[in-house]
Each structure stands twice: as C-alpha cells, then as structure tokens.
Amino acid sequence: MNTAMAAVTLIDPAPAVAAAPGRSYWGLVLRQLRRDPVAMTAAIVLLLLVAAALLAPWISPADPYKASMLKRLLPPGSPGHWLGTDELGRDMLTRLIYGGRMSLVIGVVPVLAAFVIGTGIGLVAGYVGGWVNMAIMRTLDVFYAFPSVLLAVAIAGALGPGMSNSMIALTMVFIPQVVRVAESVTTQVRHLDYVDAARLSGDSALGIIRHHVLGNVIGPVFVYATGLVSVSMILASGLSFLGLGVKPPEPEWGLMLNTLRSAIYSQPLLAALPGAMIFVTSMAFNLLADGIRSAMDIKR
Amino acid sequence: MALPDIGGPAQPLLSVTGLRKHFALPGGLLKRNAAKVRAVDGVSFTVAKGETLGVVGESGCGKSTTARLVARLIEPDAGELVFDGQAVGAQTGLALKDFRRSLQMVFQDAYASLNPRMPVAEAVAYGPQVHGMPAPAARQRAHDLLARVGLAPAVFAHRYPHELSGGQRQRVNIARALAFEPRLLILDESVAALDKSVQAQVLNLLQELKAERGLTYLFISHDLHVVHYLADRVMVMYLGIVVETGPVEALYRTPRHPYTKALLSAVPSLDPARRTRQSPLAGDPPNPVDPPSGCRFRDRCTLAQARCAVEVPALRQSTTGHWAACHFDEGLA
Amino acid sequence: MSPPGPPKGEYPSAQQEGVPMTGPLLSVRNLGVEFTGERTVHAVRDLSFDLAAGEALALLGESGSGKSVTLRTLLRLHNPRRTRVSGCIEVAGEDVLALEGRPLQRYRGGVVSMVFQEAGSAFDPVYTVGQQIAEFVRAHEPLGAAAARARALEMLERVQIPQAKRRLDAYPHELSGGMRQRAMIALALACRPQLLLADEPTTALDATVQIQILLLLRELQRETGLAVIFVTHDIGAAVEVADRVAVMYAGRIVEDREVGALMAGPGHPYSAGLLAATVGAEHRGQPLKTIAGAAPDLSRVEPGCAFTPRCAHAGARCGVEQPPLVRKAGQALACWNPLLASVRTTHDQSLPAGMASGPSFTGSGPTAPSEK
C-alpha cells in the first residue's frame, strides 16, 4: 500500500484562486461579471430603468394622462416640463417613465415565456433525436420561415388588439427561435462523454436531463434569450405603431413613437425621445447578454 | 451495493457473441441501399473473472464501438451479452439497471467525461444516488473514493473539472466508476491523453484498485507497450472483426496474424542503434464503409493470395487460448 | 519507391564536403517567453541551444514544459501584445526577433517552416491541397500559376503520397489522417526551408501511420540536408527521428545529449524519471516507477531548480540556486546532483525506492520480427 499512500500525498500546490466550498457555478459567473465594466454599466442602467418603472407613481412629476391642448408639443427644457410635452400636451418625462413599465413588461414577458417553453421543447427534441426531433423541428421551421414582424402582425391581428394579445403573439414568434438554439445545444451536449457516463449510471432519461443536460443547456439559451428582449421591445413597438397591441392613451414607447410621428418636423428632438429609450434599453440588454456570455466562458 | 458473484470462478464474467453494429450513412433515409459503416461485424469474446483483457487496434477497427455496445450505450444490431451467466436485458436475465451497477466505463477524454457545471464530489456521488443511496451516504462514499484515488477531499471535493489537471480528472472518472462498486471496468483509452509520468501514476492506481477490489478490466488502447504491461490476454481488432486473440506473452512473442506482426513492428524503437528501417504497412487504416471481400486485411497484407479474396478466414486455435484468423497461419499443425 | 525530386545540389545544404560551416544554423541564447494577462505565465526561461545545419533535434518534455511555445517563438507566432520575448534567436545569421514586415514573411516558410499536430486544422477546408501549396509557393517565389502547381505536384510526390496527381485536387477532408500529414509536410517544405519545426506531428496518428511519417521525416532530412526540431512527449518517436535530444522541464532545458548517450544513461533525474516511466514488458507485475508530484505552476517563479520538489536526488543547493546549463564535450546538463554513469552503481544503493537510475534498453519494447 506504500504507493497508495504516496499517491495520496500527490496533491498539487494550492491554486491561485482559493476555492471556497459550496460556491455554485452561477456564483462564479456573477463574480466574473462583476469584473466586466461594460456589463456592469449595462446592468446598472437596467436596474435604474426597472426602478424608475416600479417607482413611477412616486417619481413622476405629472399625471401621464392629463392632457392640455394649450401646452402641446413644448420642446424639451420648457419650464415645468423637463422633456417637453407630447402632441396632446402630456408631460413627456412622466409618459416616458410610465412607458417604461409597459415596454419592459412587453419586452421581458414574452421572452421569458418563450424561454421556458422553448427550452422544454428543445430539450426533448435534442435529447430524443430521431423522428421526434424531425417532427418538432420541421413543424417549427414553418413558423421560422416567416419574417418575425410579419408573423407577429399576423398572429396579433388574428387575436385582436391589446397588450396581452400582443404578448402572446410575440411569445409565439420567439418560441421557434429559442427551440432552435436549445435543440442545437442539447444535441451537442447529448453526445458528450459525461452524458454517456450519466446514461451508464442507469438513471432515467428525465433524471439525466434534469441533472446533467439542463444545466449545460440553459446557459447558452439564456444568453440568446437575453438578446431577444430588445427584439421583443422593438417588435412590440412595431405592433403598437400599426395599431395592434397597446392602444392610446396608454403610455408605451412604441405607441408614443407612432403618435409623435406628425411632430417629427416641428419638434424632432421630442419625437426621437421614445426611440432613444428603446435604444438605450436594447443596448443595455444586449451588452449585459454579451457580458454574461463572456463570464460563462471564463475558465480559470 | 455490489452484486454478488453468481457463477463462480470458472464462469466467464462477460461473454459476448456475434456482436454486430452497422451505422447507416446520412443520405440513406429514403434509399434502401444506403452505404453502411460496418463498425463492428461479428465480434465474440469472453472475459474471465479477475483478468485484464487488452483490446488493440487502430482507427476504424471498432474497438470503441465494441466497448459502447458492451456497455449498452448503443444498441447492437445483433449479438448476445451474457454477464456472469445471465443474459443482459432479457426477460429472465439481468435487468439493465442492475447491469449498470456491475459494469462501468472510463472514457478517454477526461474533460468531456465530467459535467463542467458539477463539482467533482457531486459527480462521483450521483451514481450511487441514482441507485437509491441517500445523499449523505453517497457524499461520504464520494469523499472516500476521492481520497482513495489520491485526491484529498478537503482540497478537491468542491472543485470543478476545469480546476483540475488531466491526470486528476481521470482519477475523478475512475472514482466515479468505482462508486457503483462494479465488477467489470471498461477503460476506453483511459490513459492515452495523459503525460507519460501521469500515465504511470494512473496505471499504478488501476493495478492497485484491481487487486484490492477484485475487479476485471477490459482495457482498450492503441499503445502496445501499456497493453503489454497491463493485460493478461490481448485481442487484436481490424475493420470490425477480431483477427487474433491470445495470452499476452504468446501474442507478443509469436504473433500469428500478419496484421498483429505489422502492428508490433510499427512501434517506434527505443534503441537508437536499432532504428526502424522500413514501415511494416503502407497507407492508412481503411474506412469500415466497404470492407474488402474475404479477408479484410488482404489489400495491405504481404501474404495475400487469390484465396484471401474469396474465403473469409475463421478464427482457429493453435496453442491453448491463442486464436488467429489467417489462411496462412504457420502456427497450426 | 524513390520519388522524383530536385537533385541534392539545389538545396542550400551545409553538409557539402570541404565547405567550412560558418556557425550553427540556429542559435538560441537566453530565450525567455512570458505570457501577460491576469497572471504572468513564464512559459520559457533562459533557454539556450544551437542547431547545426542538417541536424535533427528532439525537444522532449511533457505538458507545460515550454516545448511548443519555443517552436512558436521561433516563427514569431505569438500575439505580440500578450507576449514578452527576451533573449536572442539567430537563424542563418539573421536576428529573428528583430524581423518585421516583408523580411518576416519571407522568413516564415522560406527559411523556417512548421508542421503541426492536427493536419486537419492546419489546412483551410474550402481549398484543395494543391491550391494551398501553390498559393504558399507563390507567396514566396515569383512563379506563375502553372509553375506553382507543378511544384505542388512535385512536393506531393516527394512525400510519397500515392496517386499524387489526383490528390492535388483533393480537399483536406477527403484525405485520410496520414495523407493529410504528408500533405502538410509537403506544404511546409514547398519553399525549401533550411529548418523544419515539427510540433508533435505524429501524436494524433495511428501506430502504423506514425512510423511511416517518422521514417519519411528521417528520409527527407537525410536527402535534403534539412535541419529538424521535433517536439514530442513520446520517447520512441524522438529516438526514431533525432540525433540529439533536449529534455525540457518548466520552460528550461535540463539536459541536452546525443540520443544514444541519453538513452544509455540520463544525467538529469527528470530525464531518468521520464525514461523509467516508459511502460514496457519488463515492468509487468510490478508497480511502475513514477515521478512524484505534478508539473509546476508556471505563473510562479521559485528560486532554485524547478524540479526540486519532485526530485528524490535533491540536495540543499537545489532549492536555492538555479543550476546553470553546463555545456561540455557536446552535451549539456543543468543539475547540481546529476546521475553520472560513472557513479551509477554506487548511487543505486543510496537511491530511495521510486527513482530509477535509468532503464536498460537492450532492444525495443515488444519483440518484433526481422525488420529492425
């Protein structure tokens, strides 16, 4: 047993990164993320936006629905209205803050729903393979073949206007895209040796998916889905623009872009404000998604 | 947790008969006569209790596919698997889940064999938990096994695979396989990717574990030196079939099949004064898509004659336990 | 089958009779390579060696020894922003580390060329092998398309690829592993370099193919007077190809000897450990002699010899002072307590179990029929 004892003492020198017991994979990702200045800035921006949306009633200077025909289209910097007023005399700053609520919800909820449903379908298609995979993927290909805007419009049009209908439409647009990514990653993971090792343990397919496949699939799909949030917001604004989705007088950035269209020549800065908000939010989500992807790749 | 010995010492632990697996090449979905990769084409062998059977061959010979077929990771097209006298997966035989406790595998790629999102102790404890062991007991067993393979639990238990070196990862894989208390361990090129000094450590560990736990090994490798060191019997595969099998010393000293002879002389010389002058074989190992008729080795064989294209040579025994499949086997009486 | 090829005289060979060698082809002095980043990794430290024209040197070592980094530094392949290179490299009188722009392009491939481990990834998958060799040739010499293609064909025949004309128009994925490796050698030699660097070219190949490639390299080297640096962790491959072996550990050369001398009696405990860890039939039934411990962390610079924590032969001085590479009578050794052949018998008794003083190599591993 001497060589066994010698084997036991063959321990490597302690690693440069001190390993604390009990830390999870996502804890490591978070720590790596904290070192990324761009991602951190994006995260802070998003937090501010969410906070502003949540605290809207307390931080807004005015009533978002209160119109005043006398104060129409005041430019930004006017006294009492820091960002001016819209075409019906409502305070822009207030409408932008309140608009954040709807826009963020309409950006995140469909993506979240598509993420959950899409990952589930993708896992099944990728793990089982064979004709089940073919049946699922080719069916979804039909939906995937339509340009997203067209598909969203078609479904929303069929369901009728309204925020919840447009969210359903957007979810259905995103599901095929998420399934594609999830199925692709699952297929890759499925053939790795550690999944084979898990199969050798005698565990059921569901158990293997839960313990081994899911954790490794969720990461890439999550990053992809985070990038979809900005798409969702823009598509939603498109739907509102077309009259489907949110209806006036609700404040929603996309809808505001539509209604301020006529002011583009007289008050271009004003008309651009809702677009700027969509832009900033999209950028923040995308940069954060990039940061998470990089953090997940880090192997020390 | 280990399943008991049923058949006794004379009963082979594993008996494989007529194993066959053909993979259809893509593009053959709707066509009937699609090309097939005849990865394993009628392989039969036995593994006695407590022995190490070495399986050697080059790319395309089917040794890894054979390993996966034996482990039931892939379903064979034909063939029978008998473990300690019981047919595997059959109605009256051994249930697949019990079989999984008795037979485990260590793969070549130590990194791909470990879930990158799982700390290694959890990876080792996973198997016993699947078979019903409660979590604390499973974790304790994982810690004990990690210690046994030379990785102190206090330092290594919570580490992730990317925080370990290649040799350490392979030790984790061994610990994971042992957690089931198996009786047969398939080692599929398990030391191939390791540095030579680390390889020596892992080989020593494998030998100790085998003696301690009464294990049986199926050791697949392309490294003839390692097989010579480790194995009791050796099986040589070529293009999906077994061409020679026999006790290790007999096979290395007096190989009877031309391919075995070529393989042995292809090993680089370790003596600078006696370097290899001529390569024993030309060309690459062929693709098992369309093997030659008759003897599969005939288009690279120096002894080939007309008969070889027509008649498939059968495995014939010369001395006890030494079989070869060649028409011109001088070893036969 | 001897392939047609240009007569020996066309190659700039320093092995011509009566021509005095003006110095070694390659001269490396105090080479140091550091990778900067979160932590600085000292991949190569204070490396010095020479290579004569037409000589074959094997760099033997395990992962983390710095052998591949050395090769890549000889071709300046590292990202200059993340690498700090110090020291001096001279090839055929040129200062390699000072080359930039066109001279550097001419140097790479024209004077020094490289063959990689994975032939599959070294080739661009969307061009045929012939196109890639021809493109490579035209980048270095003013040849027309037809002449370049003819040279590509000539090179493929030179490396003994069967049916070379057909293979000229084959895509890399259509070739088998061994043929791809031959094609890569053809590519590397297409512009008649004086030095060929080979980074584990046979590690990924099957045994019967590996020996073909090793013999091919030896033959090409003898025919053309090419100098070769062959990086490997496989001692057998080193013995088949090289005249000299330099053993590397933790970024330094610890021993540099003629291959026969090294195999008969290594001087450095690490070399001895490597040789002893080579598995063979003679070890059957006993535990293998291993080198205790694991490879060192290259981001830390410890005083003294890097092998000290694993050396059964270590003395007090070893952990404190770095032993210099002492060159004497054509061999070099960096060790305070070397295993000298002349005192080997007395040493055997005092060595603790676990350290071999060197294996006995009276022949190759498994016995094999007549060819050897």
Image (tube, rainbow, N blue to C red):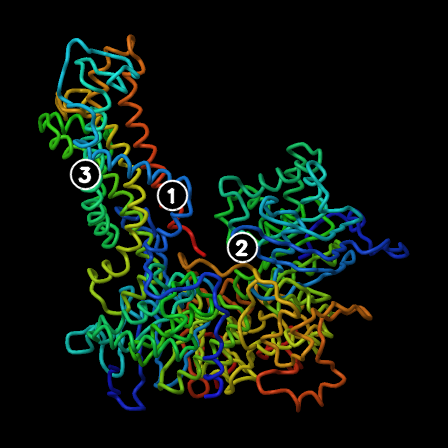
Name the quarter where the N terminus of chain A is drawn. bottom left
On what subunit does the disc labeled 1 rest? A
Q: What residue does disc 1 label? A: A291
Q: Position of residue C176 (x, y in %)?
A: 50, 54
Residue type for callout 1: Gly
Q: Which residue is mark 3?
A: A109
Badges 3 and 2, same chain: no
Farthest right residue in view: C18
Left or right: A272 with respect to B274? left
Q: Secondary structure at mark 2?
A: loop
Query: Is residue B66 in sight in this rendering?
Result: no
Q: Position of residue A284 (x, y in %)?
A: 33, 35
Picture quarter with the C terminus of chain A: bottom left
Q: Secondary structure at mark 1?
A: helix
Q: Disc 3 vs disc 2: which is toward the camera?
A: 2
Using the image, determine if residue C90 lies above or below residue A269: below
